[in-house]
Amino acid sequence: MERDPGEEQGDSDWVQLTELGAWKQPHAVQKDPEGREGALSNDAHRLPLQAPFLVEDFELPAGIRLKDLPLFPLWRLPLKLASAIATAAFLYTLLRDVLQPYVSQGRNDCYKIPILVMNKTLPWTSLTLLALVYLPGVLAAFLQLHRGTKYSRFPAWLERWMSVRKQLGLLSFFLASLHAVYSLCYPMRRSYRYKLLNWAYQQVKQGKEDAWVADDVWRMEIYVSLGIVGLAALALVAISSLPSVSDALNWREFQCIQRSLGYGALLLGTAHALVYGWRKWVEPKNFVWYTPPSFILATLLPGAVLLAKGALLLPCLDRKLARIRRGWERPRPLPEP
Ligand SMILES: Cc1cc2nc3c(=O)[nH]c(=O)nc-3n(C[C@H](O)[C@H](O)[C@H](O)COP(=O)(O)OP(=O)(O)OC[C@H]3O[C@@H](n4cnc5c(N)ncnc54)[C@H](O)[C@@H]3O)c2cc1C
Ligand code: HEM
């Protein structure tokens, strides 16, 4: 961000502090042991980090206006996106799982809102955000193939999108972790216990001795396992983005973890949601008010990203892209004389 050189001193202090990372750690600025406060207050304008300010721990130098410190600038767009997706997912699930039973059967299912509706909203948002992390890379690759060079700039919107992938990915990880905790507490709920008792009672009435449904058992074993491995992969990607870890890796190692485990997590999360859906794709009762179940909508974008990535891995495209990344350029037609 460019700044007017005529701006007041407080702003330039802020710029220097930001560049040096000092605003993250105001407590690192120590008290002046010899009490040279007056002499140092001038230096403070020039070299805020190296000048030993007389400030209390956790206080900022007086020249800095707190309101000028930007609040999470890189997180704004990802947070807005996540809120918009979560709101849409929440309203859609509310309509299908709470409003529809109330309108068509007079049944009050509001108890579903805190956990069951939330636990569809969270994974849906998480998987969509994860797809949005890897979609710009795919778009960038197709753009490079189309242009036949890596030396022309990506459009501004794509560059901006690519610059917030870390934040999108961390939000996705956070929501997936919440989803896992919500899922694991399903059996603790009183509503679940009452339902279980009711099912057992009905089974006794029907004279059924065995409630085992092999199809359902396999479905759940597989989709929960896929979810757990997917979350583990996402956790490794998140850990590798910690500065202390990424600093210990070279660029190739970092890219390898980010790409392979990131795509792995996207694949596992999508497979997890699809196996969770199992045969619900084709059961008309799941299309309430002609709306598709949420897992179908949640897997559309990730599925498209994975398919596009699969296409890029085809040898003909992969070889061409690799050449472009090494600096090769498609020969341009000579201008007509
Ligand atoms: C939990 C989590 C944490 C994350 N943390 C981080 C993080 O700390 N930092 C970070 O950057 N991202 C982070 N991400 C985002 C993501 O994992 C990375 O940006 C990842 O490298 C994206 O890989 P990509 O292949 O999609 O895109 P990129 O590797 O950016 O490639 C995009 C496109 O750029 C072009 N390209 C790539 N390499 C070259 C080259 N050598 N020469 C010319 N063109 C090239 C190609 O067209 C390519 O398709 C995180 C994601 C998650 C889920
Ligand atoms: C420990 C890890 C995980 C566990 C235990 C788990 C468990 C579950 C459970 C129980 C459901 C069914 C929810 C319901 O009944 O409504 C579900 C659905 C789903 N999960 Fe997970 N999950 C895990 C990780 C993940 C991850 C990492 C993702 C993707 C980022 C993910 C995405 C989804 C999606 C999209 C659905 C479908 C939700 C819907 O109905 O729309 N899950 N998961």
Image (spheres, rainbow, N blue to C red):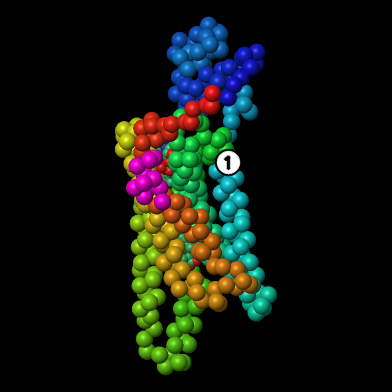
Residue, x 53% and y 38% (percent of image)? 158
Q: Secondary structure at mark 1?
A: helix
Residue, x 40% and y 52% (percent of image)? 310
Q: Which quadrant of the figure contains the C terminus?
A: top right
Q: Position of residue 131 (x, y in %)?
A: 48, 50
Magenta stretch bounds: 311-321
On the image, numbered disc 1 is attached to which residue? Answer: 77
The prevailing secondary structure element of the residues shown in magenta is helix
Q: Residues within 10 Å of mark 1 (few under 14, many from 20)?
A: some
View quadrant of ligand 1? top left
Q: Which quadrant of the figure contains the N terminus?
A: top right
Q: In front: 260, or 179?
A: 260
For this orientation, the residue located farthest to the front is 337
Q: Position of residue 196 (x, y in %)?
A: 46, 78
Residue, x 35% and y 42% (percent of image)? 319
Q: Amino acid at mark 1?
A: Leu
Residue, x 45% and y 23% (percent of image)? 28
Which quarter of the figure has residue 95? bottom right
Q: In front: 28, or 315?
A: 315
Q: Is residue 182 visible?
A: no
Q: Position of residue 285 (x, y in %)?
A: 55, 77
Disc tally is 1
Q: Position of residue 276 (x, y in %)?
A: 44, 67
Q: In front: 279, or 187?
A: 279
